Image (cartoon, rainbow, N blue to C red):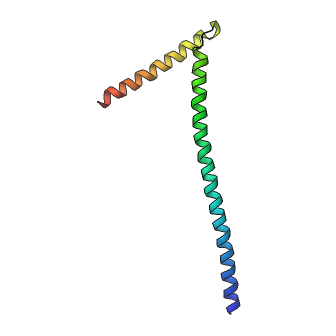
Amino acid sequence: MATKKDDLINQLEVKLDILTKRYADLQKYQQIASALKEENVLLKQQYETLKTAKTLALSERDVHQTRVQLSRLIHQIDTCISLLVVEK
């Protein structure tokens, strides 16, 4: 009887070790995912900035797109100002 108990305890210890290692791996993957999300946000911001800069670089072909982008920026600024006014 004692051997069955010992076997069960050994099996539980092995499973506990496996779970502990998997948990540690999961934490590492979560940290990697978090870092990748932050990098993704930064890259999106850089992309938008680049897109805005390229749009604002006037060329005859891009005049319409520049006007549209400027209109969007002005709208965003107006929205921010209106939110600031409402909060006061």
- In which quadrant is the N terminus drawn? bottom right
Residue 28 in the image: above or below residue 56: below
Residue furthest to the bottom in view is: 1
Task: Please report the residue visible at 66 percent of the width from the left and 82 percent of the height from the top.
Answer: 9
The spot of residue 74 in percent (x, y) is: 46, 18
- Asked whether 17 or 64 is in front, the reply is 17
Residue 55 in the image: above or below residue 14: above
Residue furthest to the top in view is: 60
Task: Please report the residue visible at 58 percent of the width from the left and 47 percent of the height from the top.
Answer: 34
Task: Please report the residue visible at 36 percent of the width from the left and 28 percent of the height from the top.
Answer: 83
Quadrant hosting residue 47? top right
Task: Please report the residue visible at 67 percent of the width from the left and 82 percent of the height from the top.
Answer: 8
- In which quadrant is the C terminus drawn? top left
Residue 70 in the image: above or below residue 4: above
The spot of residue 46 in percent (x, y) is: 59, 29
The spot of residue 37 in percent (x, y) is: 59, 42
Horizontal side, residue 67 vs residue 61: left or right = left
The spot of residue 53 in percent (x, y) is: 58, 19
Residue 9 in the image: above or below residue 63: below
Q: Looking at the image, how many numbered discs can be counted on the residues?
A: 0
Residue furthest to the left in view is: 88
Horizontal side, residue 76 vs residue 39: left or right = left
- Asked whether 69 or 29 is in front, the reply is 29
